[in-house]
Image (tube, grey):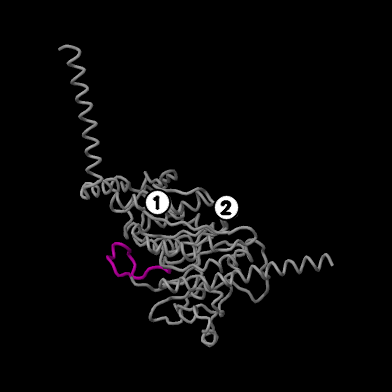
Amino acid sequence: MPVSNTASIFTGILVGLVAGYALWECASSFIPALRNRKIKTQGTIKMSLQPLVDGEYHESGQLIDLYNFSYIMNQPSCTANIHALVLIHTAPGNQDRRKLIRQTWANFVELPLHKNSIPFRVIFLLGLPETEANQSELERENFEYDDMVQGSFVDTYNNLTYKHVMAMKWFLTYCSDSKILIKVDDDIFLNTPQLMIYLHNTMLHDQLPQTGKEQTPPVESQPDRGVANNSEPSLKLLLRKPRDVLFCNRKVNVTVRRNPSDYPHAIYPPYCPGFAIVYSFDVVKRLYAAAQKTKAFWIDDIHITGILAKKLGISIRPAQAFTTICNSHQPICNSLLEESGRARRERANLDPKEYLFTLQPKSFQMHTMWQMQLKRLKKYILKNIQDSGAHIDAVEG
């Protein structure tokens, strides 16, 4: 065969392969069935499981039994001034919830600096969506806001344990100088102005006086009142030098309702409902190490803060006194939001200054809470500046 004919055949095959690949890419971009198939295949590959072996522990690239784990989207490490990391569990399709949070309690444009810094950071955590088109939307969202971390597992309800352990992994890897991890869901109002005051008074400047009256909150069960009040010990003591802190709305005596093979006992151990949990660094480190070496239970809250915490002897400190619940059964939420509700708050022994978490507020309630708490924080900062000026004047005088 002449050399020219051989070259022509080879060139034709090469051109055909290139054209075929280009045609497939175009088809997968415009035909939903092909596009969906592509991302689902990727998700299946990412979710390849391997059995855990006792004593086996692969830190690099491991997330429980996923040994090829990686971050699809990631963020830079925390700076030294970050004393609290807030990680928000969100689903790929919850764009509206993320938007509302960015407009309110994670609004760093409106949040005033205190001592020239904001001592906490907020990041959204999620897994892989169902389709490649959804993934492109998430990447565009992250390009605009630069506040999302995505793991290489399919984001489903049964995979929440992966997301929870990923939160701990990211905290320990990229924010290890931070003193506390706050894990919240995306339907929560986190009182970040109050958090700034707590961090400033305790961690940053150690201004909390030690008196015989102050005690850490008891570990015993408390009723879930959906109310914040002043009858409980201050959260400041927990945050002053945070250690052995697992702080949440503690749940006890919850009956196992699913297949007994999932969990062999009739009642789950005390655990933290996942909508809002505060961890100290040492607790995160211990729970993460245990989670990496233990077969995962599909309910992440029970697995990590119940089963593993009990195994490690970590006690839960109840946060009911710092939590409000906004629903039809807890109308007290509205009185916390109204300036005119002072008399009602006093009758109920409520203090709107102290609540840290609000569960399931409506959009207008989140905006109202945000503006009220911003106003409080600005007054606090102004008073702090005035007090500092008066102290300087007194010294110079």
| Quarter assignment of residue 364 | bottom left
Disc 2 residue crowd, few under 14, some 14–19, many 20+, Cα 10 Å = some
55 or 97, which lies in front? 97
> Which residue is pictured at 56% across the width and 75% down the height?
353
**Percent x, y for residue 158?**
31, 59
Q: Tell me: residue 144, above or below residue 188.
A: above
Q: Nearer the viewer, residue 216 or 93?
A: 93
Q: Which residues are magenta?
A: 256-271
- The amino acid at mark 1 is Gln
Q: Is residue 208 magenta?
A: no
SS class, disc 2: loop
What residue appears at the point 42 percent right and 67 percent down from the top-left corner? 275
Q: Position of residue 325 (x, y in %)?
A: 43, 75
Marks 1 and 2, Cα distance to the nearest angstrom?
Answer: 22 Å
Mark 1 lies on residue? 150
Q: Residue at x 49, y 58 (%)?
A: 122
Identify the element where label 1 is drawn. strand
Instruction: Name the side, left or right, on which 10 lies relative to 116.
Output: left
Front label number (1 vs 2): 1
Seen as rendered, the residue at the extreme right is 397
The quadrant the C terminus occupies is bottom right
Where residue 346 sits in the image (x, y, percent)?
55, 85
Q: Residues within 10 Å of mark 1 (few under 14, many from 20)?
A: many
Residue identifier under label 2: 177
Could you tell me which quadrant the N terminus lies in?
A: top left
Residue 264 among magenta residues: yes
